Every structure is written in C-alpha cells, then in structure tokens.
Image (cartoon, helix red, strand yellow):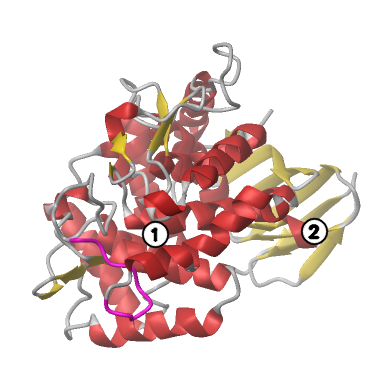
Amino acid sequence: MLALSSDNPIVEDAFGWARKRALDWVQTDAAAGNLPSYWAGYPSRPMFYSRDVCHQAIGAHLLGLDAENFAMFRHFARSATPARKWFPIWAFHFDGRIAALDYHHDEHFVREIPAVFDLTYRALEQHDWTGDRRWLDDADLAAYYRHSIGAFVEAHDSDGDGVPEAGGTGDIFLGTATYNEREAPLIVAGDGLALQYAVLRKLGHHAEAERIQATFLNDWWNGEQFARGRTKDGLDYGWGLESHDLVPLFGLSGTGERNERLLDYVEAQLETHPPLNIESFSYLPAVFFKHGRDESAWRWTKHLIDSRDDYPEISFTVVEHLVAGLLGLRPDAPHAALTIESHLPAEIGRLTADHVRVGEWDLRITQEGRHTAEITVHSGPGPLTVRVGSAGPHTLEPGRTARVSTQTKDPS
C-alpha cells in the first residue's frame, strides 16, 4: 500500500487522512451489481461524475484503483453516442445506470465541453502511469478518443474554425463551454480550448494543436491579460476561475512572459475573488507545481488539507498533490521511464513515498530538499530509466537503489 513519510508532520497527518478517506469512497463491492467504481461527486449524490473522475484518477491510481479507473472511463466512453452528439453522459450510479438527476433525455442533459476532452486526456494519462495497453486498445475507449477530436468537434463547430461552441444559453442541460457553470453564457472558454489543445498534442495532432495555441496567444491577449472566453458579443476579459487557471495547467499559454503574467493574474484574483466551491481549489496545486511556483502550490495544498472537506475530490487530489505534485513525478510506463523534479517547499526538508506504482514497477522515492533524490526499485519487469531534475538518466534494475544529486531551479 502507498505510504508517505516526511520531516513535516503536516504531510504525514494529511496523507493518512486523505488515503483513508479516499479508500472509504470505493464502491466496487459495496452493493451487488456495482461496477468497479468510487464515489466522484457530491457526498449527497451516490454517483460518479465525469469531471470528478477525471480529476480523481491520478490519486486513484496511486492508491491502487486501476480497475475502478478503467471501468468508469470506459463507461463514460460508451455513453457518447450520435444521438447525444458525442457528448458523454454527465453522471452514473455505481451500478452503471444513468443518473436521472442530470439527464432527462438525449437532447436535455448536463454537458460541458471541457469534459469531452478531459476524459480523453486523463484516460491517456492513465496509460502513461500504468502502461496498460487496454487504455489504447479497448474498442470503446479508442473510438471515444477519435470521436472527441473528430465527430464531436464537427457536430458543434458552427463557424468552421475547428473549435466546438456551446449555445451560450446559460443552461447546463443544453451544454456549456466551461467547467465554471457560473460563466455558462460563454460559447468558447479557455478551459475547453486548453483541453482540446492538450488532447490534440497527446494524440499527435501537433499542427492542429499549434494552430489553436497560436490563435489563443495572439487573438485572446489584450496587452494585459488573456480572455476567459468568447461570448456572442466577443472576447470576455473578466475573471473566469477554471476558464483561466486550467489554461496554464494544460499548457495552452506556453511558457513565456504572457504565461507568467497569466499566472500572476490568477494568483492576484485568488486573493480578491476566490472560488466559492472547494473543488475548484483542488486544481490549483497542480497549476502552480507545473510552472515551478512551488510555494504557491504548497499554500493551496495546505488549504485543501486544512479544509478536511468531505467532497471526494479533495481526498483523492490531496493524495496526488502530496506524492506526484511534491515529487514532480512524470511517468512514462510504456517506455519504462520516469522523470522526477523536486517541488518541495521550504517547509518540507524530506519526503519519502513508498510503493509508488509506475507500470509494473514498485518504487520508493525519497527527495531531500532540492539537492538529493534516492530511488529504489523494489520490483519490476526489467530496468527502469529514471531522470532526476537536470541530472542525466539512471537505469535501475529491480532490487537496486540509486542516489542522485539533483540540480533543480530554486523555488519561486
């Protein structure tokens, strides 16, 4: 079982709570007929939601819930039909029944454009973590990936620019452009665009992804900040929560000066206009870890920890942030490789994660500040190539340990 130790007692206490609480949400054997599944949505709703499953999946993998991830993702994939114009169903009960709360009929059900691409991106991300060929070869999933960037876009691209649009009605049962349901009148949103961009890159459609990114970088910038999206009246530069902060998370804003100014803007808005819902906060550590703003990432991780909120997304993402986030894990199990980049903040001098699963490899990873990493391969099918920071790659056989001097950038 995944274990975590640290010289910071906050980390150990938080991990103990998050691991137990997340595993308590598993529903696989809770009732006859249940799919392999876990609770992913409001605690008052015994269901799993597409957005929540997408965001809980890495934490779930780290906790050994690969069967649950695969079953739920495939169930969503099967639900995206021509009659639903290739939107997946928004929520299911644990036995696989459509949740009537969010579905009335095939033309009136909750649907949000980012979720279509999020399911593809996160499913392929699970392939990176597990190396399990089913994530590529399963007929339902493979068809879903194709349709998400093909038939779905064609069905919803009213102006022919290769980007799907929502109706801008503000009615989630008719479809929204963004995960931020309070900004439903948008017809195109930054988070939907960012996820489409990320999926195109993930599937090797680089020219199309670059075209979308170039349009965003050039047309959505007003000299001070990026728009959160487009309404029927033009670009909207108000604060958009997910429609702003998921843009750097999925790389749409690149890595240059404009991206840094976007991150500055997000940080400033969080001080004056924070999210009203705790689950929106759960994205923030990953946003800031990705761009080396590690003290900010740790601040928002602690915010989630301190909340002890019972929304399942919180416990699952706390597991992710404490392990994959702080250690900066980027798995490539299909190619027997792992990259580690320390994101330890000043408050954490040492962090050890034991029984981290990357493909069939079982690992112990210790990071000491920004200067030293130690990796042990408990077991595995063969050698694993590990790259730590800017140091050269190390090839580790099962049963071997490597201690690596790291050269990572200072925390910002």
Q: Is 134 inside the magenta-drawn segment?
A: no
* Image position of 393 with respect to 327: above or below: below
Name the chief secondary structure element in magenta: loop
Q: Residue at x 51, y 85 (%)?
A: 207
Q: Residue furthest top?
A: 31
Q: Position of residue 321 (x, y in %)?
A: 48, 45
> Where residue 288 is drawn, which disc sits there?
1
Viewer-side residue, 48 vs 304: 48
Viewer-side residue, 354 vs 278: 278
Quadrant assignment, res 124: bottom right
Quadrant assignment, res 161: bottom left
| Residue 74 visible from this viewpoint | yes
Q: Residues within 10 Å of mark 2 (few under 14, many from 20)?
A: many
Check disc 2 and report the residue beneath it.
Answer: 336
Q: Residues within 10 Å of mark 1 (few under 14, many from 20)?
A: many
Q: Amino acid at mark 1?
A: Phe
Q: Position of residue 188 (x, y in %)?
A: 25, 67
Q: Is residue 163 left or right of residue 265?
A: right
For the C terminus, give its image quadrant: bottom left
Q: Amino acid at mark 2?
A: Ala
Q: Residue at x 49, y 68 (%)?
A: 150
Q: Secondary structure at mark 2?
A: loop
* Image position of 40 with respect to 134: above or below: above
Q: Position of residue 297 (x, y in %)?
A: 39, 53
Where does the magenta region start and end? 159-167
* Image position of 36 with respect to 317: above or below: above
Q: Secondary structure at mark 1?
A: helix
Q: Residue at x 16, y 55 (%)?
A: 183
- Tag 2 or tag 1, which sits nearer the N-term? 1
Q: Residue furthest front?
A: 83
| Residue 126 visible from this viewpoint | no
Choose mark 1 or mark 2, whichever is in front: 2
